[in-house]
Each structure stands twice: as C-alpha cells, then as structure tokens.
Image (cartoon, rainbow, N blue to C red):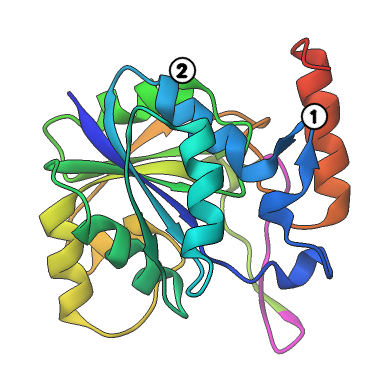
Amino acid sequence: MKVDAVIVAAGASTRFGERDKLLADLCGRPVVAWSLAAYEAAECVERVVFVVAAGRVEEMESVARAWAPAKLVAVVAGGERRRDSVEAGLRACRARSVAIHDGARPLVTGEIIARCVAAAEGKPGAIAAIPVTDTIKVVRHGQVVGHPDRATLWAAQTPQVVLRQAWLDAAAASDGDETDDAAMLARLGLDVSVAEGDPENLKITRPADLEIARQILAARGVQ
C-alpha cells in the first residue's frame, strides 16, 4: 500500500525553552530534517505534506525542500490545535490513506514507517506504539483512583496511518481536540491496529531529549 505523509511541525515548543526545538541542531541537521529525510526515503510514501506554524511557511519551506526534495508537494500553515494542523495537512493530500507524523520524532526509521503502513492496509488505521514498562496509576485530584493492568497499556508514537476521509469525517463530528489520531477515529467507532514501534522513536520535548537523541544516533554510527 502507498500512502501520503503529513509531517506536523506547527507546535510552539513551549517545554523546550526559548529555542525552536524543530530547528535545533541534531548531529548536523535540524531536528525536523531527520523526519523529512525518513519519509523521503520510505518506499511506501508517495508524497509529503509539511505543516508548520502560521507565518513561518516561507522559512520552513526551505528546510523541507532541502530534506524531502522529491516528495514534498506542499508546505501549509497549521492551526492553534493539533487537530487543526493535521486537518490542514490532510486536505493537501490525495492518497486514500495518510501517515501522520510528529516532526519532533526525528529518530523514526523506514522500518517503523513500513510496519505501520502494512498494519493499516484494509483497516481504518494503525499506530506505532510500544508496551509500557512503568507501572501506571490513574490519579484524580492528587489521589490514586485506578490501577490499570500494565499488560494492556501501550505508549502511542507516530506514524499513525489513517483513512483520510474517515479522519475528516470524525473531526467534523465534534469540534473537540484529540491528542492522537487513533482517538479521532474512535469518534466514529473505528478501531485501529497497532504496529511495533521502537523505544528509540522518542519525541523531543525537553533539552535533555536532544542529548539522548544524539547518543542514539551516535550508536547508529552517525557523528
């Protein structure tokens, strides 16, 4: 199955500090360049749409064209919420299924992308995820109110592959935001599959995450 890809890079990076984490240097490339290059190289991806903060389209387009020169078809402005940015990207796509990726996950590999796309074939969607290793508690008002079975808990990553029209229909059903695309599809009662992610497919949220990413890339032989 062939898909389009939407790489979302429209966030404010508030937890990273004063720097823009998406343009922070990671082993000689901006953080977001690693995601762009991964989708450029993925055989199952036909086109790439890059979603950036409003007012930064021209600035970020030069980055995108440097790292996804063959597949980039559009750089579009996102919105205030994640769902607004994803919707802007999906409306610029043409494929029936689309892989949605967080531009702050630079260590995604072609293998993860391919597994997720394969898991979505013939289904409403699929997400990359990994089993949770910590014991999780449900907390309300500072009190533990639930003890979920760790064996049933998985940590969602990206890519998340969705049927494009199903996502748009689900978004139209309610104006509320969602933290990920599986939750959006759940509005229509649609179940998604899980493809094996990777603990190294981390999200850059704080400056310490950038150092961890550098170490992972060094272990992969990148200097």
Q: Position of residue 173 (x, y in %)?
A: 16, 79
Front residue (pair 5, 54): 54
Q: Position of residue 167 (x, y in %)?
A: 20, 60
Look at the image and tell me whether residue 154 can be seen: no
- Magenta range: 133-143
**In the image: residue 23, left or right of residue 41:** right
Name the element at disc 1.
Answer: loop
Look at the image and tell me whether residue 20 can be seen: yes
Q: Nearer the viewer, mark 2 or mark 1?
A: 1
Q: Earlier in the sequence, mark 2 or mark 1?
A: 1
Name the element at disc 2.
Answer: helix
Q: Amino acid at mark 1?
A: Cys
Q: State the residue position of label 1.
A: 27
**In the image: residue 209, left or right of residue 54:** right
Q: In which image quadrant can residue 213 be found?
A: top right
Q: From the image, give the main secondary structure of the stretch colored magenta.
A: loop
Q: State the residue position of label 2.
A: 111
Q: In which image quadrant can residue 18 be found?
A: bottom right
